Image (cartoon, rainbow, N blue to C red):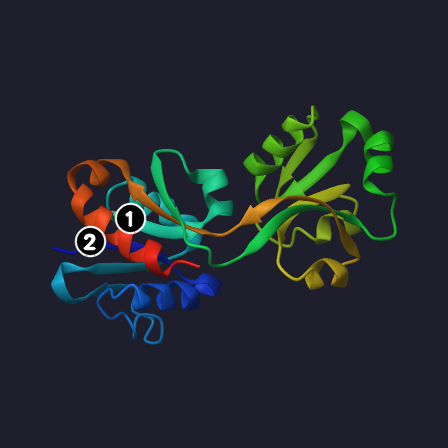
Amino acid sequence: MGLTLALPKGRLWPDVQALLDRAGLPAIGGLAEDRQLLHDAADGWRYLLVRPSDVPTFVREGVADAGVTGKDVLFEDGDGLYEMLDLGIGRSHMAVAVPADGPDWARLLAERGGSLRVATSYPAAARAFFAAHGLSPRVIRLRGSVELAPQVGLADCIVDLVETGRTLAANGLREAVAIGPVTARLVANQQAYRWKGADLGGLLGRLREVAA
């Protein structure tokens, strides 16, 4: 029997699809093109195409046995999931960025101290980073357009994902501190791992052979 997988729509999808194809999973070629979100494939495999931020919910609630999402999502919503494998795709990194025409990072911390304001879509990751450095800034959660926050005086800096840095530069920001790399991960439902361990182990073995 196959498994039910929650897979991410959006920028990760082409890399995920290519990876699963290399691993020899039943064909899922038309899933994105025809906007079909539920796909029953051969040998009992089923694929759910969902927002990356929703993958943990589908897996944790047992609707899917396993799923693929970014480490950035797991920073915020990884409780109750078993992180099985770093797939090595969807590479970016999380970083602190500051206004390009403002003070450097050390001076900004010295000037703002305990009143530092940080805008981010990743509050848990931001709090963990600053706590590790003995800081407790005010963290302002935004769902998007994070780069706008320093321009309009909402925040002193941001914590966000960075790929090329072009979006930062276009919005008058520069990277100040790299927090850490972010890649796509294979995660499993803890109960499914107990009862479907052999199937999940087979999936893990296939993906490990072809992961970047």
- Density class for disc 1 (Cα within 10 Å; few <14, some 14-19, many ≥20) is many
Task: Find residue 162 and name its label.
Answer: none
18 vs 118, left or right, is left
121 vs 195, left or right, is right
Residue 140: horizontal and vertical position, in percent?
Answer: 65, 38
211 vs 134, left or right, is left
Provide the residue designation for mark 1.
66
Provide the residue designation for mark 2.
3
| Residue at (70, 38) in percent of width and height | 118
Give the amino acid type for the residue marked by disc 2 in the picture.
Answer: Leu
Q: Are marks 2 and 1 in contact (CB under 8 Å)?
A: yes
Residue 159: horizontal and vertical position, in percent?
Answer: 66, 44
| Residue at (87, 32) in percent of width and height | 111
Q: Give SS at disc 1.
A: strand
| Quadrant housing residue 179 | top right
**Is tag 2's residue or tag 1's residue first in the polypeptide sequence?**
2
- Density class for disc 2 (Cα within 10 Å; few <14, some 14-19, many ≥20) is some
Q: Nearer the viewer, residue 122 or 82?
A: 82
| Quadrant housing residue 114 | top right
